[in-house]
């Protein structure tokens, strides 16, 4: 097959991938794999210099991260090299995601070969709009849309439903999830696409002399985007977007309090702009206040930001076990696909000393460390951590250069900022959001986010390289990254680890106390406890034979609170499994209830059952 035909076929599947990744993982990955297959065939007709140009250093760093995990796994399992089951195990775990980094050279290749440069923004924009549309639909349905469609528009009992967010104007709403498996994955796609695409469309609007119709459409889409990002409750993405905005301010040398903020030069020259701005702020404040009053998830999200410790203790145990793994294996790591096994071993050590943590540690997700850098370091050791640092230094360096909008007044013909590629490169800026967001989630390990993430990076680098870069000066600039970026990346990664070390320094029993739910009003008080009441923990799990005691102490002080003479005890049976693994909801079943006179001693809730 001739190279021109293979290029066209690869481009066709690449465009399908750009449209399809917010809709279906299997469809988009299939399109990507076919595009990559014909991409490699097309390289036969390229010169050595052209082939090397589509594999920049940022791709080498990304590929090396997975390569180091592979090598350290071989070193740790050298005695199993002739065991077929060991090689089959490499189909799972972190190493198996190496092919996703091919999104970088694939995007660069098609940008280089594109006869119409705006085809990629067109198809990426369609994918973005589909992502917004499916997100809006999912706000008003209790079902997880992808699963609902997969089951033939039926939802059997026991299937995991959406997270209920609360009522808005007497209408039930749910966390937007689109067609993704979880709301966090959908939040990752929102953060990945939102900043770059919005800046790109903003400059398109400017080029069209601020067309009013296009401006109104862009404003509406921007409002929808903000609503979905806020309502999605992915607070890690909120952090990423704040980081992006701060970087934007820093790169343009403008203070938020200066007369012309950024180079956008928002100037309120007349009264109507001032009134419009005040109305916009007022509408946002009113909407937020209504959501805060009527929506318990919004309330919890705001309160948890300022809480020293919250009732969500899972992250504490995940990070505590993760740091313990890193402490034991800092140089070579624990190896590919070993995180869940090592996590169970660390949980076993905790439960042996604190048996009341058994239930909670049993339902904690065990798939990853909820911190991209920490997870890659744990699994692949120090070499992987170094390449992770180099990878993000290259990405942030290029992003900072493109974000320097104040340089766009350059008149040099070969200068990046004086070409149409500068605006097109803005499409890739959203990848910056994933860096700080990865301090709280493992977005780079999520297949639904990782593949478009690497592709967006390819778009960022591809349009930058497509400038008139035949001169030696631009070639040199393209090959290096800024020391400032490396210092910034290293500093933030270090601070994130210090932050989580401090947060996990508390004792397990102190954290567990925070999980006890206590609701009190004038009529009654409710205390919620959870734990395993039926079995003893150990190497062999056995049924409990001896009764389990709970000690209550009431302080009788008439000046403050008069404790009750009677209490009602209810026993519920609740499932205990990792929801992220079995993908089912935890079901609860009421067993029995009993009224007790607390003035008596040595009460038994099983008596006269």
Image: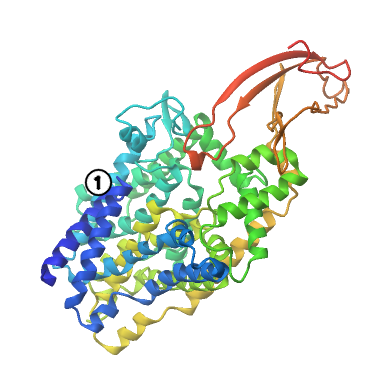
Q: Which residue is mark 1?
A: 217
Viewport quadrant of the N terminus: bottom left
Residue 192, horizontal then vertical, whole percent: 38, 55
Q: Residue at x 58, y 21 (%)?
A: 589
Residue 354: image quadrant is top right
Q: Residues within 10 Å of mark 1 (few under 14, many from 20)?
A: few
Residue 499, horizontal then vertical, whole percent: 64, 59
Any part of residue 543 in sight: yes
Q: Nearer the viewer, residue 574 or 267?
A: 574
- Colouring convention used in this rendered image of the protein: rainbow
Total count of labels = 1
Q: Residue at x 31, y 44 (%)?
A: 132
Residue that lies at the very extreme toward the bottom in this rendered image: 472
Residue 356, horizontal then vertical, whole percent: 73, 38
Residue 480: image quadrant is bottom left
Secondary structure at badge 1 equals helix
Q: Does 534 sit left or right of 204 as displayed?
A: right
Q: Nearer the viewer, residue 573 or 313?
A: 573
Is 561 placed above or below 566 here?
A: below
Q: Nearer the viewer, residue 525 or 390?
A: 390
Q: Residue at x 42, y 23 (%)?
A: 170
Any part of residue 206 in sight: no
Is 210 placed above or below 68 here?
A: above
Residue 471, horizontal then vertical, whole percent: 26, 88
Is 153 placed above or below 569 here?
A: below
Q: Does 321 sit left or right of 116 as displayed?
A: right
Viewport quadrant of the C terminus: top right
Q: Does 413 sit left or right of 29 as displayed?
A: left
Residue that lies at the very extreme toward the top in this rendered image: 608
């Amino acid at each position: 097959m001739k190279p021109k035909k293979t290029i066209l076929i690869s481009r066709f599947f690449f465009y399908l991938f750009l449209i399809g990744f917010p809709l279906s993982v299997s469809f988009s990955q299939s399109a990507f794999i076919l595009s990559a297959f014909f991409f490699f065939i097309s390289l036969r007709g390229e010169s050595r210099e052209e082939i090397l140009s589509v594999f920049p250093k940022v791709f080498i760093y990304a590929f090396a991260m997975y390569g180091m995990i592979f090598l350290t796994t071989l070193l740790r399992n050298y005695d199993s090299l002739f065991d077929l089951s060991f090689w089959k195990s490499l189909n799972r775990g972190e190493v198996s995601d190496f092919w996703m980094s091919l999104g970088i050279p694939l995007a660069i290749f098609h940008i280089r070969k594109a006869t119409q440069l705006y085809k990629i923004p067109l198809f990426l924009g369609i994918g973005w709009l589909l992502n917004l549309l499916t997100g809006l639909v999912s706000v008003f349905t209790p079902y997880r849309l992808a699963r609902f469609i997969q089951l033939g528009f039926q939802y059997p009992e026991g299937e995991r439903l959406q997270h209920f967010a609360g009522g808005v104007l007497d209408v039930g709403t749910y966390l937007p999830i689109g067609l993704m498996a979880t709301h966090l994955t959908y939040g990752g796609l929102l953060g990945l696409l939102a900043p770059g695409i919005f800046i790109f469309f903003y400059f398109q609007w400017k080029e069209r002399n601020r067309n009013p119709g296009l401006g109104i459409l862009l404003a509406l889409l921007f409002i929808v985007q903000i609503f979905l990002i806020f309502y999605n409750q992915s607070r890690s993405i909120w952090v990423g977007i704040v980081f992006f905005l701060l970087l934007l301010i820093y790169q343009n040398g403008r203070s938020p309090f200066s007369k012309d903020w950024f180079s956008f030069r928002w100037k309120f020259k007349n009264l109507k702009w001032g009134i419009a701005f005040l109305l916009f702020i007022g509408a946002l404040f009113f909407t937020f206040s209504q959501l805060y009053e009527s929506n318990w998830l919004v309330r919890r999200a705001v309160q948890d930001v300022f809480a020293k410790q919250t009732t969500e203790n899972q992250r504490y145990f995940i990070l505590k076990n993760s740091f313990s793994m890193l402490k034991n294996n800092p140089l070579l790591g624990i190896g590919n696909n070993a995180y869940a096994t090592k996590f169970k071993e660390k949980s076993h050590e905790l439960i042996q000393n604190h048996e009341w943590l058994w239930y909670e540690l049993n339902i904690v997700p065990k798939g990853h460390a909820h911190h991209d850098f920490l997870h890659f370091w744990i699994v692949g050791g120090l070499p992987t951590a170094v390449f992770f640092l180099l990878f993000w230094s290259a990405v942030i360096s290029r992003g900072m250069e493109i974000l320097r909008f104040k340089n766009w007044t350059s008149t040099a013909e070969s200068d990046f900022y004086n070409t149409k590629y500068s605006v097109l490169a803005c499409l890739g800026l959203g990848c910056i959001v994933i860096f700080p967001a990865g301090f709280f989630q493992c977005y780079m390990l999520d297949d639904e986010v990782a593949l478009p993430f690497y592709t967006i990076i390819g778009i960022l680098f591809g349009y930058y390289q497509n400038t008139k870069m035949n001169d030696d000066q631009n070639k040199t600039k393209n090959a290096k990254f800024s020391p400032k970026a490396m210092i910034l990346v290293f500093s933030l990664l270090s601070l994130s680890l210090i932050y989580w070390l401090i947060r996990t320094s508390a004792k397990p029993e102190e954290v567990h106390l925070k999980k006890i739910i206590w609701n009190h009003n004038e009529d009654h008080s409710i205390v919620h406890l959870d734990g395993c009441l039926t079995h003893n923990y150990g190497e062999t799990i056995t049924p409990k034979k001896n009764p389990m005691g709970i000690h209550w102490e009431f302080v009788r002080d008439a000046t403050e609170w008069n404790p009750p003479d009677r209490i009602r005890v209810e026993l519920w049976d609740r499932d205990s499994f990792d929801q992220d693994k079995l993908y089912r909801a935890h079901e609860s079943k009421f067993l029995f209830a009993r009224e007790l006179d607390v003035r008596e001693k040595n009460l038994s809730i099983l008596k006269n059952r």
